[in-house]
Image (cartoon, grey):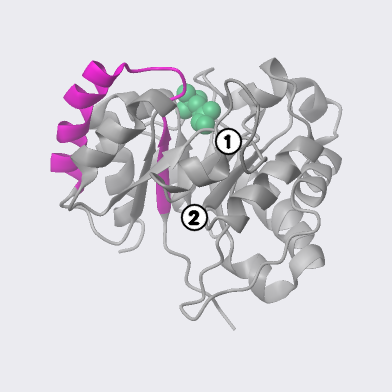
Amino acid sequence: MSVKRTPLVAGNWKMYKTIAEARQLVPDLVQGLSKVGGVEKVICPPFTSLMAVKALLEGTDIKLGAQNLYWEKEGAFTGEISPKMIAELCQFVILGHSERRTYFGETDETVNRKVRAALEVGLIPIVCIGETLAENEEGKTQSVIHRQVQAGLSGIQLQPDNSGDVPLVIAYEPVWAIGTGKAATGEFANRVVQEMIRPTLSMLFGDQVAKSVRVLYGGSVKANNAAEFFDQSDIDGALVGGASLKAEEFIGIVKAAAESLE
Ligand code: 13P
């Protein structure tokens, strides 16, 4: 049975934009994105801007995501933010981004704890995976991707709901393509999704779930190269960093996703 996956374009603002700056950007995004249908749109500002951005998104179809959470329900964990606190504001949460793995010591095991905690409160995790340049050059892409998916998602239950949606998104972000201006080719990224990510999902959750999970590409996606990814059979959207900070660029990427449906 073939499955229809709704394209999703998410903007990861990383550690950019104060509240004041967010208040300048979001109205432009709302204006440009409100005319684009058929694509799920998510913006993921830093924690400090979530409330302000949520207010600005009221009445629009743009959804909100956070960039991290801590897995404990509550407690003496100075500086951390719980799943429930995020769920009060957001529908999505980015987990296991390569910058968190590289600079903040996140591992497949901690990512797994976060994924479980997010699902428990009804958040949709956007789980980031991807090989480094060295791993890619050493021919280890397949084993790294397999390990990250398997360990990151171990012990979770996933079922498509009545509309066929699965509450989990994967973002394939080859580390060498992030912030470098050197995007993967659409053909390469599609091959990773088709031959490595979905087969591992199928092994874990069965074929139906593997076909229903949306898999995004991330890494130097811009308005002028986005179509190359959206035209691929197994790529369902993009996780956008730098280009999500510029209204025109992000709107251009979402439009490219909508055009790929035509
Ligand atoms: P860039 O789009 O800036 O390469 O960042 C990609 C990314 O890390 C999104 O999570």
| CA–CA distance in space, label 1 to label 2 | 24 Å
Element under disc 2: loop
Task: Give x and y (percent) for residue 86.
Answer: 47, 41
Task: Give x and y (percent) for residue 102.
Answer: 71, 19
Q: Is residue 107 visible to us here? A: yes
Residue at 69% x, 35% y is: 130
For residue 25, what is the image quadrant? top left
**Mark 2: amino acid:** Asp
Q: Which of the two residues, 237 or 226, is positioned nearer the viewer here?
A: 237
Q: Is residue 60 magenta?
A: no
Q: Which of the two residues, 228 or 220, is positioned nearer the viewer here?
A: 220
Q: Is residue 50 left or right of residue 85?
A: left
Name the N-terminal-most of marks 1 and 2. 1
Element under disc 1: loop
Classify 173 as above or below 156: above
Read off the magenta span. 8-33
Q: Is mark 2 within 8 Å of ligand 1?
A: no
For the N terminus, the image quarter is bottom right
Q: Which of the two residues, 128 or 191, is positioned nearer the viewer here?
A: 128
Q: Is residue 17 magenta?
A: yes
Q: Which numbered disc covers residue 139?
A: none
Label 2 CA crowd tier, 10 Å (few <14, some 14–19, many 20+):
many
Mark 1 — residue? 69
Q: Which numbered disc covers residue 236?
A: 2
| Mark 1–mark 2 CB contact (< 8 Å) | no
Q: Is residue 223 visible to us here? A: no
Residue at 33% x, 56% y is: 39
**Mark 1: amino acid:** Leu
Which mark is nearer the camera, 1 or 2? 1
Q: Is residue 29 left or right of residue 94?
A: left
Task: Give x and y (percent) for residue 115.
Answer: 66, 48
